[in-house]
Image (cartoon, coloured by chain):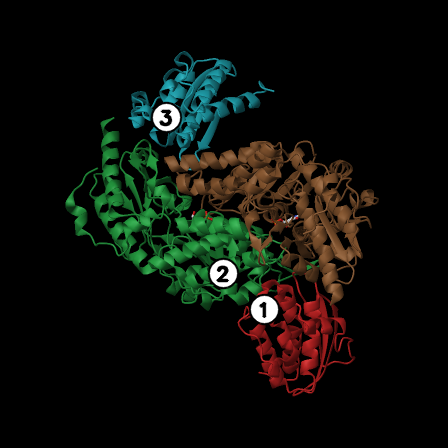
Chain colours: A cyan, B red, C green, D brown
Amino acid sequence: MELDSLYQEVIFEHYRRPLNKALKPNPTIQVRHTNTSCGDEITLNLHTDGKKIIEVSWDGIGCSISQAGTSVVSDLVIGRQIDEVLQIIEAFQAMILSKGSDSGDEKLIGDGVAFAGVSKFPARVKCALLGWMATKDAILQARCSDGEGK
Amino acid sequence: MELDSLYQEVIFEHYRRPLNKALKPNPTIQVRHTNTSCGDEITLNLHTDGKKIIEVSWDGIGCSISQAGTSVVSDLVIGRQIDEVLQIIEAFQAMILSKGSDSGDEKLIGDGVAFAGVSKFPARVKCALLGWMATKDAILQARCSDGEGK
Amino acid sequence: MRNTPRRKRYLVSRLNLSAIKAEFPILRREIRGKNRLIYLDSGATSQKPNSVMAAERDFYENHNAAVHRGAYQLAEEATELYEGARAKVAGFINADIDEVIFTKSATESINTIAYSLGSAKAGTRFHIRAGDRIVVSEMEHHANLIPWQELASRTGAELVWFKVSEEGRLDTSNIDELINERTKVVALTHQSNVLGTIVPLDQITAKAHSVGALFVLDACQSVPHYKVDAKALMVDFIAFSGHKMLGPTGVGILWGKKDLLDEMPPFLTGGSMIETVTMEGATYLDAPKRFEAGVPNMAQAIGLGAAVEYLNALGLDDIHAHEVELTKRALEGLQSITGLSIIGPKDLEMRGGVVSFAVQGIHPHDLGQALDQYGIAVRTGHHCAWPLMRRFKTIATTRASFYLYNDFDDIEALIDGVERARKYFQSR
Amino acid sequence: MRNTPRRKRYLVSRLNLSAIKAEFPILRREIRGKNRLIYLDSGATSQKPNSVMAAERDFYENHNAAVHRGAYQLAEEATELYEGARAKVAGFINADIDEVIFTKSATESINTIAYSLGSAKAGTRFHIRAGDRIVVSEMEHHANLIPWQELASRTGAELVWFKVSEEGRLDTSNIDELINERTKVVALTHQSNVLGTIVPLDQITAKAHSVGALFVLDACQSVPHYKVDAKALMVDFIAFSGHKMLGPTGVGILWGKKDLLDEMPPFLTGGSMIETVTMEGATYLDAPKRFEAGVPNMAQAIGLGAAVEYLNALGLDDIHAHEVELTKRALEGLQSITGLSIIGPKDLEMRGGVVSFAVQGIHPHDLGQALDQYGIAVRTGHHCAWPLMRRFKTIATTRASFYLYNDFDDIEALIDGVERARKYFQSR
Ligand SMILES: Cc1ncc(COP(=O)(O)O)c(C=O)c1O
Ligand SMILES: Cc1ncc(COP(=O)(O)O)c(C=O)c1O
């Protein structure tokens, strides 16, 4: 049944028990992203030393796909080098925009592969990307503000 | 041939030798009417004593239908009572908007009946009406300004 | 799909549903495999009967030419069809022909009024200035809210609004405070696209006129479903969209009182709306041409004319009665589901065929996704009424909206589908 | 109809005319009795091939739903088709996808820019104020003249214009006087809809940019007929209409540079163009959504996508070459008629397939009427370019305009028809 291919068990696990959902104080940068077509919104706090992601924490309301997605990405990137994280995000993005042709590299995107089915539902792609794009945005903003990026 | 049914000989006669085409000075009222879709324009001078049409004179450029129409109406109304003239104009209007079903009452509208064929060409109705509507407008304006109308 | 006898208890519709369904080819679509399409999103856009598609095609195949400009036979025919469509729409809302303006959408219709008023010169009756007031409500669609916010911000006028009660009704308790001598415009929806609430207008239009304000009615959700009489309503402007009333996309209507339209500054300017033009300036024709610059959406207007004829043939009263019955069953059936709550009136009093609801613990997006899997198309999200969502302390609802091609089976499918989705998500 | 061998002297077109004509059902119409339709008014609006009508119908029959809003299968399909059409149009003019905005018409496209600039706050780069300059030309269509007159009158800016030479070319001799440091906008037509003149842009765009002015191109008469490359042209905005390029009525295009569009104030406001909305105010999405408020003209955009595919399949270069040959024969044949004079360039240099002319002693309305009687549809009047008529000291011309479905027989019929009409009116 196709609904199960969208709603993988892993997604529900993250939705029921989201990781890093509670904003940690004093972030390097805070971003707020909205899915303008449905109103779902997340706030995401990023702690970074400019090279590494020290902490990602978040809060918000949304559907299972957007909530689970944010949980997955936050868990995946904490403790990693920024360049590596941007690569991971790019890989996830490629999968989610592939319309089903890219099933994702688990070594790279971890639980992110559970979202492979979402790529067949274009209207949900934005939900799946919400937390990922917020993370990317936060990283790029942090980079800019501390003069690391050009 | 249908073209002849539009371009009655009478129309060409009025077109070639238009009546009352040369503005007479000191009119009771002057109006200027334009066919906004083609740019044709006439200026019409009306002399009236409030009851009777004393003089109608006009100038302008336009197609055979609009020029002939203005010639016909000017010739028809000079010397008549205003109420009668309004009736004549109404009769002409009814014919020209009838899409071919009303061939016109020659006793009432005189040479105006030559325009019966025009009513089958909706895009030319405005041309045929140009001078008639200018005359009507002038009469109504004159009425207003001398307090005759309510 | 469950097949209980309970639907038999409901009124047999005066509409011949099987004949109607046959006229809407899209209803034969299969969704996500072999599911019959159960289309419950007519509040967003309606489906199109064969006659509408045929009217557009006939125009293109036999009469296509620029209206009002050409003097050749095709152009004459095109003009007659286009103006004929205007006459049909005018008849449909009991308006004079010259009061009906074809726009591209209700959104454009409302913007037309807002921009036109915004262009009115100081000293004219339409001029809006700092200190003036514009009144809307908390249940407006963004299309009847943001144009007024922008007009207010351009002119310095103040935007104020009616609140919405817990039951989803317009709260008019402070009407005398909201509509006062400074009020220039009152812009309200006729029926909420989220709640289904029909707004009683008499008191508000009377009050608006008593202070000399213009009344703008957003009739997107009413004109397609029940009789709206432009003359009886005592409003000044009405906006609605063709695509929500069986018509093509790309055509909307602005109705306005002729004397107002003729006096107001034009909005879009260009060809076919001018009286004379020099390099220095232009003068403009009266309505409707004044507000129809350029080669118009001819095929779409003509398609809308065919839609109006289709609606007339069925009869708006029967359509409305049918939709009330569908709504009655939907309200009853949905409320029997554990954890489901209706957002909007729960009774049928002054209420159209739009039902918004929430199911505890299930985000509307997820619910809508499951329903889609069963072939049921509903709308989820803020429905372009974000402030109303905030009013009800939510960010989104699930909305089912009905039209003349929906039958009781569709409603049962919705009720069953929501129950099934609830169990699916609960079990995970 | 005369059947001389003279047309054999002309180039055989690279287009397969009989195959093309078969795709346009309206060309089988009979006019005023048994005359074959000879449609020579494509400058006003073009006819539609089967594939365009089929694309619209397929949308309504299989995929119709509100784009960007619904999460169900139909809505996903509709969104993909609609955005696919945007991609096709973008490819057609070598633009980025997000730079292509669907409007209802070129008229709306141009008004969009004019109103958006007019709403720009003081201090922003788009703000226009008293003393600023807007530059147009004497050969503009009303759609690219009146919106700028109105913008000038709302802001206090000054409207100035390029003149037109006796040969019907843009007179750029005073360019340095017209375009100076105060100039904020230069809005010009790419090809005159009356004269057929193609305006050489390089010098003017360079000058405009050197003073920091925005350049708006009215490409209504160029995009349908030959390759227009948005990136190569060095302009900031391009406006054109779908209905003149085989597409449905009710859809136009506004192309703009992304960084400009994203910064400019929105024009029409409402649903689907917002980022967030409260009762107090709203924030807006980037282009293209920023400029597409409301449920869009979905079927029309999709039909336009099919039109673009049809044009691509034939090839714009071959289409243009074909039209040049038609124009060559028309110019030659018409000028052999006693008392006929061409208004506009008499050579083929920088000239499109639009030919305006006057016949001594015969009013264009009468001439057009006679031609219609023979089945020939031409346009007569001021062609929404009233100031240009004045420039040529006339009130109206007769205009024949050609497109890919016209063949040499059509041109011969025109030449014969004018001669026949001349004799008819002379004999009366
Ligand atoms: C040069 C030119 N500009 C603008 C327009 C306006 O186009 P539309 O009426 O489709 O908006 C036209 C056609 O009428 C035109 O030929
Ligand atoms: C109440 C209401 N007003 C306005 C609109 C806007 O209509 P459109 O998007 O067709 O312009 C809609 C529909 O979306 C609506 O439901």
The answer to whether dots 1 and 2 both sit on one chain is: no
The picture places residue D257, in percent across and down from the top left corner, at 63, 35
Q: Nearer the viewer, mark 3 or mark 2?
A: 2
In-front residue for pair A102/D159: A102
**Do pointers 1 and 3 mark residues of a single chain?**
no
Residue B86 visible within the image: no
The residue nearer to you, when weighing B65 against C169, is B65
Kindly identify which residue carries mark 2: C84
Identify the image quadrant of residue C13. bottom left
Q: Is residue C299 visible in this depiction of the protein?
A: yes
Horizontal side of residue D302 vs C309, given as left or right: right
- Against C352, residue C258 (above or below) is below
Label 3: chain letter: A
Residue mark closest to the camera, 1 vs 3 = 1
Specify the subunit that label 2 lies on: C
Q: Which mark is residue A22?
A: 3
For the C terminus of chain B, which image quadrant? bottom right
Residue type, mark 2 in image: Gly
Q: Amino acid at mark 3?
A: Ala
User: What whole-number distance in Å separates the C-alpha atoms at marks 1 and 2?
Assistant: 17 Å
Give x and y (percent) for residue D28. Answer: 55, 48
- The residue sitting at the top extreme is A107
Q: Is residue B146 above or below residue C179?
A: below
Question: Residue C343: percent from the left, percent from the top?
Answer: 30, 46
| Disc 1: CA contacts within 10 A as few (<14), some (14-19) or many (>=20) | many
**Tag 3 and tag 2, C-beta contact below 8 Å:** no
C69 left or right of D283 in image: right
Kind of residue at disc 1: Ser
* Along the line of sight, the residue nearer the viewer: C382 or D399: D399
Specify the quadrant that holds the N terminus of chain B. Answer: bottom right
Residue marked by disc 1:
B119
